[in-house]
Amino acid sequence: MGLKLKSIEREAWQDFQKETPFGSLFHRWEWQDILEIGFGVKVNRLGLFDDEGVLKGLLPLVERKMSLLKLAGSPLSGAATPHSGPLGPVPLDEFLFALEVYGAEKHIDYLELGLPEVRGKEVLEQNGYTVEELITLDLPIPQEEEVLWSGLEVRCRNAIRKAEKSGVKVIEAQALEEWLEPYYQLSCGVYKRQEKEPPFSKEYFSALWQNLYSKGDLVVLLAQYEGKTIAGGIFPRDRNVGYYLDGVSDREYNKVVPNNLVQWEYLKRAQAMGITLYDMVGANIPSIAKFKKSFGSQERNYVYAYRNRTLAARVGRSVYAKHGETIKKFLKRS
């Protein structure tokens, strides 16, 4: 009969995750809480069970309604999660069959998957998915600061020196009220220049802090210059992997290059925390990729796949491709 997807309780979820060396921040139970609070979505915490009722894997499946359509994904676009998918040693074809059965039972119109590496493209396509390869950037972190410094490109090292010489100081936030308002205002400014709504709300930032900081799994850095906060970055972690989740800056202060110094200060902290791999999360915008590569990071491909389960979903995705920003603004206000 194969695998079956069923709801699972927190204790069983966390026990399974502790026993597997795989997975990521984005499979953690707390991450699903962050998404529900920050984006107003529903996250189905599902277990993959075999015929004998033995738990073989986990699947966080994000769900939201868009007009008459029911969308679901692991992850789902727009929910600040680059990849997740199934966790556990389950064959991809068996997982996709179980997901299709679940999708039919729950009347899901549209499915998305983001897998952390390039694997199973043919299997996904055979099961009706459209598959794309996206790029992220990984930076292995050595134990010695001198080795880390020497791995930076010359232009990156020069930018760090310039920021320090100009008087930019980077501080690590110790309380939510220290950083929430200035960081959010910088975020609004970044997206206002692009005539877009900021993707992250104060509720999302607060949920990040409340769910991860007390566990030692979140670093928030602020760059200050002449008494003003001019840049910042948010860096969660899971075990020995750190993530560059978000960064903001005031373009007026680009001349003192605060973003390079923010990254450098994080890398030094990551070393002290025992982090061995830094996932810089995304490299599909050339200018941002160039900045991230200056720290010595290397490209890694991963898979994004989607499936329109109904005709309505096929039409809806076509409309969204043309009018996505307008739809996002509507959803934010609704």
Image (cartoon, rainbow, N blue to C red):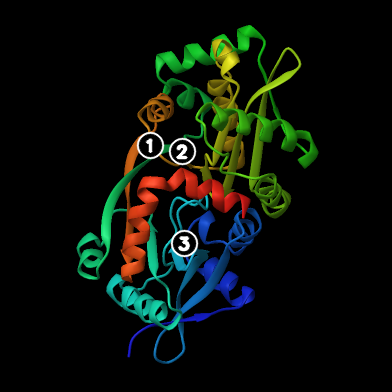
Q: Give percent across and percent down for residue 229.
A: 70, 23
What is the number of the mark on residue 283? 1
Residue 15 shows up from this direction: yes
**Residue 302 vertical position relative to residue 284 in the rendered view, above or below:** below
**Residue 244 vertical position relative to residue 17 in the rendered view, above or below:** above
Q: Earlier in the sequence, mark 3 or mark 1?
A: 3
Report how far apart the C-alphas of labels 2 and 3 lie in the structure.
21 Å
Q: Amino acid at mark 1?
A: Ala
Q: Give percent across and percent down for residue 20.
A: 48, 66
Q: Give percent across and percent down for residue 249.
A: 59, 25
10 Å crowding of disc 3: few (<14), some (14-19), many (20+): few
- Closer to the eye: label 2 or 3: 2
Q: Secondary structure at mark 3?
A: loop
Q: Is residue 228 left or right of residue 296?
A: right
Residue that carries the numbered disc 3 in the rendered image: 21
Foreground residue among 321 and 104: 321
Foreground residue among 46 and 299: 46
